Amino acid sequence: MNRHMQYLASQAVAGKLSRRDFLGKAAALGFTAVSANLLLSSTAKAAGPQKGGTIRLGLQGGSTTDSLDPALVTNTVGLMVTRLWGETLVELAEDGGIEGKLAESYEASDDAKTWTFKLRSGVTYSNGQNVTAEDVVKTMERHSGEDTKSGALGIMRGIKDVRADGDSVVFELDSPNADLPYLLADYHLIIQPGGGMDDPAAAIGTGPYIMKSSDMGVRFVAEKNPNYWGDLGNADTVEIIVINDDTARVAALQSGQVDVIDRVPPRTAKLVERAPNITVHSTSAAGHYVFIMHCNTAPFDNNDVRLALKYGINRQEMVDKILNGYGTVGNDTPINASYPMYTELEQRQFDPDKAMHHLKKSGHDGAILLRTSDNSFPGAPDASALFQQSLAGAGIKLDVKREPNDGYWSEVWNAKPFCTSYWGGRPTQDQMFTTAYLSTADWNDTRFNNEQFDQMLVAARGELDVAKRTQMYADMSTILRDEGGLICPMFNDFVEATTDKVDGFVEGIPGQVLMNGYAASKLWVKA
């Protein structure tokens, strides 16, 4: 019987038998859906990637104000598009380590203050130019300049000097940092010819695809780069369609308009999975849905107001009703158990009496305005309504303003003092804190300026004793939980879906959504 099942699975992988028919025959032979799907998946992987065809992705998050400049990428669409045409020096590996991209190797000095990255030879950009060490230096300079708006600015703050040395690039740091390779894997730091100084949005890079058309907030088309040096890129063409509406995105998948979608609404995920030609993938990671307050803007510049809001949110209700169980309760810090040096802190509980106490202590007695949109995270308006109801029980009036999806990331997030948002997380505590909570970080979206926190962050980078470093990160999380502008009620699983037209999806890859942003390059179209 097993041999017959193997035969059926091979027929399904070859496209000679539909997934629906395969599952039906497997059920008739006494196999559960789980075991049949596992067999199908292992057979597909054993057959190896297939080349050719077109993969179409329907993604949430894009808007007409987006840019192809990697420094300005703020959402999933930007991440996925950038991964098509560009590459960083190094990248997060599927096992959570670091692997080379444009750098074939790297090494640190004994004090971890000097890092040398040796470039891979023979790599060219899509315009035919060779990649040089000078390009890397210029790229880093562009992301660290005085006027830069780069999301990697916080990362660049700790780098004192970058210089070319033949086919290598040398980074001199202000202080030791054992995590520098993780920081340089940040998706903003795409290496561009001349650093992208002349035309940062030209989309000239070393990635597996070449951009053929770009209509911001609407549609992107990329074709295989014939001179790509690596083994990414199985489909001939990748098409990314921006579909911000949750219902429309799921309908596009079900109708076959697209082959892959992100952000399957948790409330309908189990229903979507019932379709015989669709597989829902769920990955627990560091992603979190949040409410962010500017700590330097009234009334949020009063920590008692911040604490009142933190005690006034019912976290378990958020996980149950917004995530439908696809996630875990948060604790007002961006760090959860997915991080390597994690320490569990005392869990903050929903406590209307404490919320009322802190609001009264603050002296604030007016309503508080929260801005939201579906573009910030799936179910954000519903989550805001739940927040409004739970705060009402503590005598706190919350006004909720629903903003347009288009332009949310440029007009509201990191601009208005209180709004809904999301973070995909980062592979290490240092990178997460450095990107969003260091006082000087451009993406410090809570305007958190804490000298003690900054000093501890720098000190932790140079601490080689793991136990001491772990305690330092726990102390930083405690500061954020008790004094920060982040309300983190829940860590969301990445819930995504594919049709049986494509294969190769791997769940559990660390980093960002959709296989750390590489789904378009690693999936393949079944024959």
Image (spheres, grey):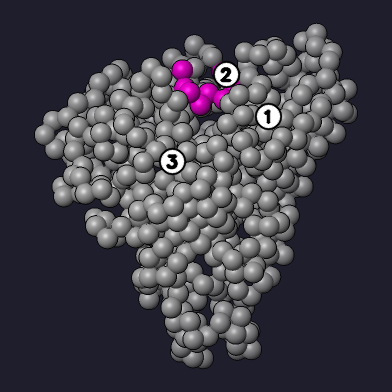
Q: Which mark identifies residue 114?
A: none
Check disc 2 and give the amino acid type. Arg
Are the residues at dot 1 and dot 3 in contact (C-beta closer than 8 Å)? no
Tell me, yes or no, if residue 388 can be seen here. Answer: yes
Q: Position of residue 252 (x, y in %)?
A: 63, 63
Q: Which residue is mark 2?
A: 447
> In this orientation, which residue lies closer to the viewer: 234 or 96?
234
Q: Which mark identifies residue 68?
A: 3
Q: CA distance from mark 2 to mark 1?
A: 13 Å
Check disc 1 and give the amino acid type. Cys
Q: Residue at x 49, y 11 (%)?
A: 451
Q: Looking at the image, is 354 positioned above or below residue 513?
A: above
Dot 2 or dot 1, earlier in sequence: 1
Q: Which mark identifies residue 419?
A: 1
Q: Position of residue 362 (x, y in %)?
A: 77, 10
Q: Residue at x 75, y 40 (%)?
A: 381
* Range of residues picked out in magenta: 440-448
